[in-house]
Amino acid sequence: MSKRWTLGALAAVWLTFSGLAVGQTGTASVTVQVLDAAGQPLAHAVVQLDSAAAARASRAGSPQRIVQRQRRFEPDQIVVTVGTAISFPNQDTVRHHVYSFSPAKRFELQLYTGTPATPVVFDRPGVVVLGCNIHDEMLAWVHVVRTPHFGQTGPDGRLVLHGVPLGVYELAVWHRRLPEGVVVPRQSLRVLASTPTQVVTLGTLLAP
Ligand SMILES: [Cu+2]
């Protein structure tokens, strides 16, 4: 996995939204499809719907683990809500030194084996890139969101968000192939019970 992907790799990202009427409950399902520049489904894209109400409804998730095994992070990508704690058990015999310089969470777990006593609480939204000071090839991403409405696309590049309260949101899509620190384009999305399927091309927004 190269650290140096180009924005061009994501020249075309297509999103399809479909609000499915659930009527009286006041919620809808939102379907998002993300494609790469070649029109192929892009898996593991992070999709989120933000709004002030969504931020108020966001709660810290249950504690998570990112294990180091055979000099790799497992999982190497995770999406959590603000306030979620993650522990970093080292199951290798070699020591690791996990750190991040990302603005959303700067931290360092000095050379260790076993499980550090204190988990790391991810307390700001944003993308946190994890590395190991000893093993340059170790990379992982923690995507921190402040909304209950988020997920990752599957192998077919699709994600369905269920139970989204009707209203106006900002929709953001992120993928690890975006350069670190890139400002991810956001767009307004009004979620209606009868929202027609929408196709949005982010390619023109992402093109250099
Ligand atoms: Cu290491």
Image (cartoon, helix red, strand yellow):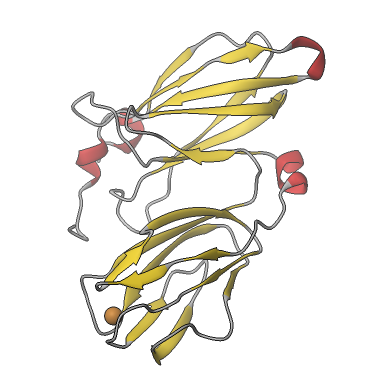
Asked if residue 202 shows in the view, the reply is: yes
Task: Report if residue 48 is visible in the image.
Answer: no
Q: Residue at left 25%, top 44%?
A: 7
From the top left corner, tell me how far across and down residue 199 is, in percent. 42, 16
Q: For the C terminus, give its image quadrant.
A: top left
Residue 190 vs residue 161, the one in the foreground: 161
Give the side of residue 88 with respect to residue 30, left or right. Answer: left
Residue located at (56% from left, 55% from top)? 80
Residue furthest out toward the bottom: 111
Q: Residue at position x 69%, y 58% from top?
A: 60
Give residue 128's quadrant in the image: bottom left
Quadrant in the rendering for residue 154: top left
The one of 184 and 87 positioned closer to us in this rendering: 87
Q: What is the x, y in percent for residue 40?
A: 23, 26
Camera-side residue of 161 and 147: 161
Q: Position of residue 52 (x, y in %)?
A: 73, 42
- The answer to whether 114 is drawn above or below residue 72 in the figure is below
- Farthest residue toward the right? 24
Q: Quadrant of the N terminus?
A: bottom left
The image shows residue 100 at horizontal and vertical percentages of: 41, 74
